[in-house]
Image (cartoon, grey):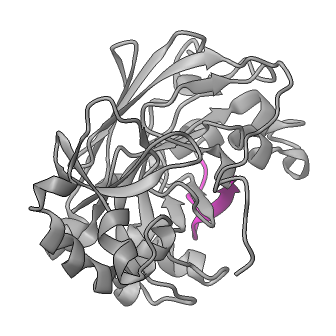
Amino acid sequence: MRIVSFGGPGGEQPGVLVDDHTILPLAPVLAPLGLPATDTTHILALWPTIRPLVEAALHDTHRHIARAGVRLGPPVPRPGKVIAVGFNYPLHSNAVLGDVTPPTEPVMFVKLPGSVCGPYDPLIKPPETKALDYELELAVVIGRAGRRIAPDDALDHVAGYMIANDVTARDVALGAGIHSPLQMQLVRGKGFPSFCATGPWLLMRDERDERLDAMPLNLKLSVNGQARQDGWSSDMLFDIPALIASISSTTDLLPGDVILTGTPSGCGFELDPPAYLVDGDEIRGTITGLGEQHQRVTDEDTTSREIPVTPTTVRTAS
């Protein structure tokens, strides 16, 4: 089953793709039963209960809406945490660190939830960077909460998988330079709005044969039609169970949390000469079975403006 969100930025509603052209909105299915109908993280937490209700409603065509002309937002519009993993593909790691001993445990950092955007939204290039770069990644979404999760149990905590682009302003992220690690600015360099495009859909793990959890997935990214990244998830230094076990030893993992599992080689900074993103560039990223996302790079309008009140900008105490 493919979970999507649809609607304007900040006001997305959850849905399910019936097919490539049709969406089943979940609010009319769930709200009359007193179930959470507008927050994807709550839906994921209750998925074992909700799934049969959704399956039963899939063939009720009166509830369907056409996908055409509807904006798809990030499948999980308001993740509690976005945890990223660095240096998880050896060739990419070597390009950053040189020929050094690989990490003995996952290197983790965070992206700001406000960096998350939809799969076709523009990538906004802030004026602070002249080294804007892409990183296509397989994203894992948590469906079942846990702490200190054993590797053998890790996949039971996975709701599903989606595409993500861990965009980085490399000059901002480096801060005072790689030789001054305490002054690096990873959160700033990776946290601008639109720096984490996700989707177009979240492929729920219940739709996958268990053998496919370990099936190599092909990650491909192009810029203006030119192939840049072409890697396989099987090249990860730490696989998904190992990542979940390691990350959950540090922090609780909750439904809707997103883990970015690392990027293969071929980023713009690795090219000779480096090829960073500029206004007008078109990025396309695909992963086996997870669809395609595309973004157009657009220079930021730096005019001061108010942020509208939406479910994304207003948090309620729980």
Quarter assignment of residue 3: bottom left
Residue 127 x/y as whole percent: 78, 19
The answer to whether residue 276 is visible is no
The answer to whether residue 35 is visible is yes
Q: Residue at x 51, y 85 (%)?
A: 145
**Is 18 in front, or is 148?**
18
Residue 101 x/y as whole percent: 59, 57
- Does residue 111 show up magenta in the picture? yes
**Is 127 in front, or is 308?**
308
Quarter assignment of residue 107: bottom right
**Is 231 in front, or is 73?**
73
Q: Quadrant of the C terminus?
A: bottom right
Q: Quadrant of the N terminus?
A: bottom left
| Tally of numbered tags | 0
| Placement of 305 over or under 252, stated as above or below | above
Type of secondary structure dominating the magenta stretch:
loop
Quarter assignment of residue 55: bottom left
Question: In the visual, does 153 lie left or right of 68?
Answer: right
Q: Residue at x 65, y 54 (%)?
A: 312
| Placement of 131 over or under 107, stated as above or below | above
Question: In the visual, does 263 lie left or right of 205?
Answer: right
Q: Residue at x 51, y 39 (%)?
A: 8
Residue 13 x/y as whole percent: 44, 54
Please provide the residue range marked out in magenta: 100-112
- Does residue 187 show up magenta in the picture? no
Q: Residue at x 50, y 55 (%)?
A: 88
Residue 306 x/y as whole percent: 82, 34
Residue, far left: 59
